[in-house]
Image (tube, rainbow, N blue to C red):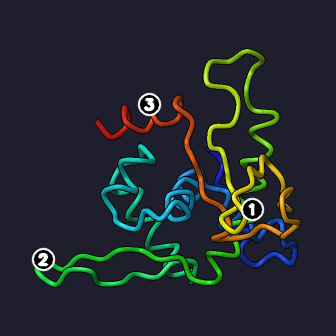
Amino acid sequence: MPKRADLSDTFCPVGRSAELLGDRAVLLILRELFFGRRRFEPIAANTGLGPQLVSARLKMLVAEGIAERRVYQLRPLRYDYWLTDKGKALFDVLYAMRNWAERWAYAPGEIGAGPAIRYVHRACGSDVGTATVCPGCGAELGYGDLKGEPSSALRAEQVARTA
């Protein structure tokens, strides 16, 4: 198999972004961090990824300044992971991917199709659908502005994954 080209020093911003974010594991871990899951075990369980892969990607996210480790227990020593401002700025990227998938990634009539997560604007309570500006109050939507309500199909999938 040919070796993948390293794009970390390219001048192209899409290439640099792809070098960092072009890994499914990284995107799934970021999703979990955005949902407020900060501890290793729930992140691994909800992504379905192996512990070595989750550990390696979390280390990379910390090294890149996207997440930071914080001690939450001294004996035994345990850490949780928090998004930095750099990490929080990726919200728009994942939200755009979610919005694209809600429109294009499901087959017509697919079971569970429809919004996997219903997003509600925390400030005014409006259902935002896939909007980037709240249809209720007109506010631009960003990190921390939305409350997610998983569909029954997504809830069932999450329960099955962690069982």
Mark 1, Cα crowd under 10 Å, few <14 / some 14-19 / many 20+, is few
Q: Is residue 153 left or right of residue 124?
A: left
Quick one: which residue is furthest to the left in this view? 75
Residue for point 43% across, 62% down: 37
Q: Quadrant of residue 93?
A: bottom right
Mark 3, Cα crowd under 10 Å, few <14 / some 14-19 / many 20+, is few
Q: Is residue 44 left or right of residue 86?
A: left
Q: In this picture, is 128 found above or below 5?
A: above
Provide the residue designation for mark 2: 76
- Cα–Cα span, label 2 and label 1: 36 Å
**Quarter of the image where the N terminus is located:** top right
Q: Secondary structure at mark 2?
A: loop
Q: In this picture, is 59 found above or below 101?
A: below
Residue 153 percent coordinates (x, y): 53, 29
Residue for point 30% across, 57% down: 41
User: Which amino acid is tagged 2?
Assistant: Pro
Question: Can you tell which of label 3 and label 1 is closer to the viewer?
Answer: 3
Provide the residue designation for mark 3: 156
Provide the residue designation for mark 1: 93
Q: Quadrant of residue 151?
A: top right
Nearer-the-camera pick, 78 or 58 = 78
Q: Secondary structure at mark 1?
A: helix
Q: Is residue 161 left or right of residue 27?
A: left
- Cα–Cα span, label 3 and label 2: 33 Å
